[in-house]
Image (cartoon, coloured by chain):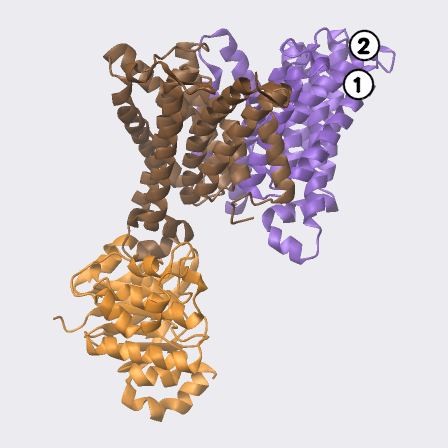
Chain colours: A purple, B orange, C brown
């Protein structure tokens, strides 16, 4: 990373550390959860080139798994998160195995249909309590010591998990494995001809993305202390796509920016009568038509053009 | 009838950023068969595609039958009287032979009737219900030429019609093209096969690095063979 | 009382009829999707919203203009088709050159806007749409009771699907469409205005969705949510049938409707997901779909 980039990252982290003193902590925590979700999703879309339209299954599914394990089995929050991640990873493995058999558009449709199947399962399964969802999820004590019912404690716990998750994604993307993923995105036939078992790499990326999305989902269930059906709907899958597209597909920071913007937008519209989905849909259409690089993508393009002109 | 049917002057063309044609000059008179020779990759196919309008980024002068081709959108070029037979033949697999044959719309009067086309290409008549791509290479080439004949176009652009075909089929195609010439069809042909070209062509152009370097009538072909063979690396 | 596998025949046939009705709508909707995908290579996520739009246009025309069902059968598809033409000209045509995923995302956004807008104005509850007088009542067939309108839906959908199939597979226009999916540049070089064909195709697909919608109005009620409830099932139908195949979409639509109906009888809890289970199996065994050509 360049010096200027490192400085920006440090600044960003500092801002996040200071945030709960300026903004309502639950609001920022919500942003962090979705930002992690979007980053995990971007690992699959931006770096491997696979559009999944069913990521809500991992996000919402892990929310259920974490909530259930913390509430019914009495696990501490960190273990609850791990249970959520493992559940999401397994779900990702099953869905991935089926979906990888198709390419491109077909892949997206299959993930959509499979996650819809999971939605109906969640609707009917006893442990999810259907339309009510799992309520009253205890936050517990981190490592048995830190009381997560204290807003600041919870905030820094969430921030720490967020930073670990994003760092993990950053490491994956910049590793040799990540390079191969990107080569698959750029030119899959070429990657195949170079001898890479492309199917296995795609599946691995899918499972990793699912697990990290699951981490975000489990985290969210701890923050809000409930897990609901809303988080496994295809509308939620669409939301994370929007966050990533708006922020910038294939950039590390883009999904974070996108998530922040979408959550802020939803918050500001929540009090007004104006329908949020109309605005969301309109932004989708505009982004796809004229703004495909997303905010961060455009900023990066602008910066590199100015560097060339100097 | 105008003196020249196709007038190309200073034609430059680009594939995206890549500058492929560097000022092509050529003319084709009505009823002539003109052959474009050149090594692989010099821009012969691009020239045909630029004339047709498939390659859109063009500058220069391009006039056909008095019309400015540069102003026309792709789907109007055929209506000006130009028919295109691509190198890959372009037979549609979702259509049978008859549908392939009937597909290009009639753009002007004076085209051949189906019976006349079947007289020229009898084996197409036999195979008319087969799916387009079940035909042999030679039959597909004949179909690709045949379907343009119904449309009433004044000039055919043919891209390597004999490529990959057996000598017997090549002769049949040559006969068909001669037959068309007798009916007044103007033909611009890209070919590597000298023998075939010498049978049917009136004039030759040689292309190098995206521009025409020489032109000569068929009478001079024999004399120029040694230099051509060197130039074209055959 | 006659029973099959412990289920009374009346109940079985009743559910099969419901399945056939659902299948009729699946067939019409997946037909429109398959046509749009075949020609434009775009997955029209807005298809469900257009179906809903078709039903609503019919409902609004009846409520405010007194326009009957029969007129609505023609006007609603025309109106929605026109809407589709505008969308294609203004926006979709710009997306043909980029990754097809953007087409999916654009139509997804469109679906959100249309559905969100209608939800805002009409709420989520359904509005009833009266069965047209000529089609009310029912017939006693001896082994079961057949409501006339239900029978009409099945017959009309078969007619619509057959007519569309005929248009695509047996007419000159259809030949242009099929050839354009293979090699649009060459078809244009022949002198055919392919961009206009593409616009027409999208409009046709939208009109088909709207027609399904107005036909569905007396059966399912008119609700802003009717589109999103059905669209994902239709996606699964198209994946099973094979995306490039018109006939595949039609047959699979009816078949899956019947399978859904059967499941409701013998194993009701699974009736929501049986279509997705079938899809999963087909993906394992024949990834290109039952009638699909490309992998």
Q: Is residue B221 left or right of residue C291?
A: left
Q: Is residue B148 left or right of residue A97?
A: left
Identify the residue at horizontal 29%, vertical 86% (top origin). Answer: B218
How many labels, in total? Answer: 2
Q: Which residue is mark 2?
A: A140
Residue with the mark numbered 1: A80
**Residue occupying the point 49% across, 27% down:** C231
Quick one: B140 or A73, which is closer to the camera? B140
Q: Mark 1 — on which chain does it sit?
A: A
Q: Residues within 10 Å of mark 2 (few under 14, many from 20)?
A: many
The reply, left or right, for residue C79 in relation to residue C258 is left
The answer to whether any part of residue A230 appears in the image is yes
Dot 1, how many residues are within 10 Å of its Cα: few (below 14), some (14-19), or many (20+)?
A: many
The picture places residue A8, in percent across and down from the top left corner, at 65, 30
Q: Are marks 1 and 2 in contact (CB under 8 Å)?
A: yes
The chain ID associated with circle 2 is A
- Say if A45 sits above or below B58 in the image: above
* Residue in the foreground of this view, choosing between A282 and C40: C40
Q: Secondary structure at mark 1?
A: helix
Residue lying furthest right:
A144
Whether C43 is drawn above or below C73: the answer is below
Instruction: Compute the Cα span from label 1 to label 2.
Output: 10 Å
Locate residue A193, reporting x and y percent: 65, 58
Percent coordinates x, y for residue C127 in the rendering: 39, 10
């Amino acid at each position: 990373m360049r010096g200027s980039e490192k400085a920006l990252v440090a600044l960003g982290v500092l801002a996040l550390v200071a945030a709960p003193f300026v903004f309502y902590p639950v609001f920022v925590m919500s942003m962090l959860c979705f930002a992690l979700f979007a980053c995990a999703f971007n690992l699959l879309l931006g770096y491997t080139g696979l559009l999944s339209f069913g990521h809500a299954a991992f996000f919402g599914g892990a929310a259920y798994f974490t909530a259930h394990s913390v509430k019914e089995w009495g696990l501490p929050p960190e273990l609850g998160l791990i249970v959520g991640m493992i559940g999401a990873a397994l779900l990702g493995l099953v869905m991935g195995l089926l979906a990888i058999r198709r390419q491109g558009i077909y892949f997206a449709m299959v993930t959509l249909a499979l996650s819809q199947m999971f939605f109906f399962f969640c609707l009917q399964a006893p442990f999810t309590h259907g339309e009510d969802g799992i309520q009253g999820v205890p936050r517990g004590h981190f490592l048995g010591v830190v009381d997560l019912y204290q807003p600041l404690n919870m905030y820094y716990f969430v921030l720490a998990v967020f930073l670990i998750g994003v760092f993990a994604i950053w490491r994956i993307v910049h590793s040799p494995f990540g390079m191969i993923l990107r080569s698959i995105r750029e030119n899959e036939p070429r990657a195949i001809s170079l001898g890479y078992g492309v199917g296995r790499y795609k599946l691995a990326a899918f499972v990793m993305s699912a697990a990290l999305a699951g981490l975000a989902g489990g985290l969210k269930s701890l923050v809000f202390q409930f897990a609901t059906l809303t988080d496994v709907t295809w509308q939620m899958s669409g939301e994370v796509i929007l966050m990533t597209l708006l922020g910038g597909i294939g950039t590390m920071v883009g999904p974070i920016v996108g998530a922040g913007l979408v959550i802020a937008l939803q918050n500001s519209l929540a009090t007004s009568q104006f329908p949020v989905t109309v605005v969301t849909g309109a932004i989708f259409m505009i982004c796809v038509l004229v703004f495909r690089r997303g905010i961060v993508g455009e900023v990066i393009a602008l910066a590199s053009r100015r560097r060339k002109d100097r | 009838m105008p003196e020249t049917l196709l007038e190309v002057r200073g034609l430059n063309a680009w594939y995206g950023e890549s500058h492929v044609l560097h000022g092509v000059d050529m003319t084709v008179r009505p009823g002539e068969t003109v052959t474009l020779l050149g090594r692989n990759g010099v821009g012969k196919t691009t020239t045909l595609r630029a004339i047709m309008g498939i390659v859109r980024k063009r500058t220069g002068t391009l006039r056909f039958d008095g019309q400015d081709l540069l102003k026309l959108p792709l789907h109007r070029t055929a209506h000006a009287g130009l028919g295109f037979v691509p190198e890959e033949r372009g037979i549609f697999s979702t259509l049978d032979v008859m549908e392939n044959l009937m597909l290009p719309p009639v753009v002007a009067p004076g085209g051949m009737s189906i019976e006349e086309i079947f007289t020229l290409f009898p084996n197409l008549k036999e195979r008319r219900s087969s799916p387009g791509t079940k035909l042999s290479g030679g039959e597909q080439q004949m179909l690709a030429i045949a379907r343009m004949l119904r449309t009433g176009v004044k000039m055919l652009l043919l891209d390597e019609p004999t490529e990959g075909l057996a000598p017997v089929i090549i002769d049949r195609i040559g006969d068909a093209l001669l037959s068309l010439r007798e009916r007044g069809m103007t033909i611009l042909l890209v070919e590597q096969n000298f023998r075939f070209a010498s049978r049917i062509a009136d004039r030759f152009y040689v292309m190098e690095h995206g521009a025409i370097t020489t032109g000569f009538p068929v009478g001079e072909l024999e004399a120029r063979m040694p230099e051509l063979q060197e130039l074209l690396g055959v | 009382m006659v029973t099959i596998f412990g289920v009374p025949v009346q109940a079985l046939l009743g559910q099969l009829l419901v399945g056939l009705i659902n299948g009729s709508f699946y067939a019409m909707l997946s037909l429109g999707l398959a046509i749009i995908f075949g020609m434009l290579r775009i997955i029209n996520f807005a298809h469900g919203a257009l179906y809903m739009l078709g039903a609503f246009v019919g409902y609004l025309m009846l409520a405010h203009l007194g326009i009957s069902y029969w007129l609505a059968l023609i006007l609603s598809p025309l109106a929605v088709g026109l809407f589709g033409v505008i969308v294609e000209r203004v926006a979709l045509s710009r997306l043909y050159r980029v990754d097809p995923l953007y087409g999916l995302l654009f139509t997804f956004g469109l679906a959100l806007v249309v559905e969100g807008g209608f939800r805002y104005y009409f709420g989520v509850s359904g509005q009833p749409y009266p069965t047209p007088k000529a089609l009310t009542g029912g017939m006693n067939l001896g082994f079961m009771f057949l409501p006339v309108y239900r029978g009409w839906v099945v017959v009309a959908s078969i007619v619509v699907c057959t007519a569309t199939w005929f248009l695509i597979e047996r007419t000159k226009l259809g030949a242009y469409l099929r050839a354009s999916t293979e090699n649009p540049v060459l078809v244009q070089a022949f002198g055919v205005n392919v961009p206009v064909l593409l616009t027409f195709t999208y409009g046709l697909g939208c009109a088909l969705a709207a027609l399904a919608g107005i036909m569905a109005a007396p059966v399912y009620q008119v609700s802003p949510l009717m589109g999103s409830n059905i669209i994902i099932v239709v996606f699964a139908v198209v994946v099973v049938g094979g995306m490039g195949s018109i006939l595949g979409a039609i047959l699979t639509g009816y078949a899956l409707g019947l399978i859904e109906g059967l499941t409701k009888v013998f194993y009701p809890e699974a009736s929501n997901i049986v279509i997705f289970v079938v899809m999963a199996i087909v993906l394992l065994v024949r990834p290109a779909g039952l009638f699909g050509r490309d992998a």
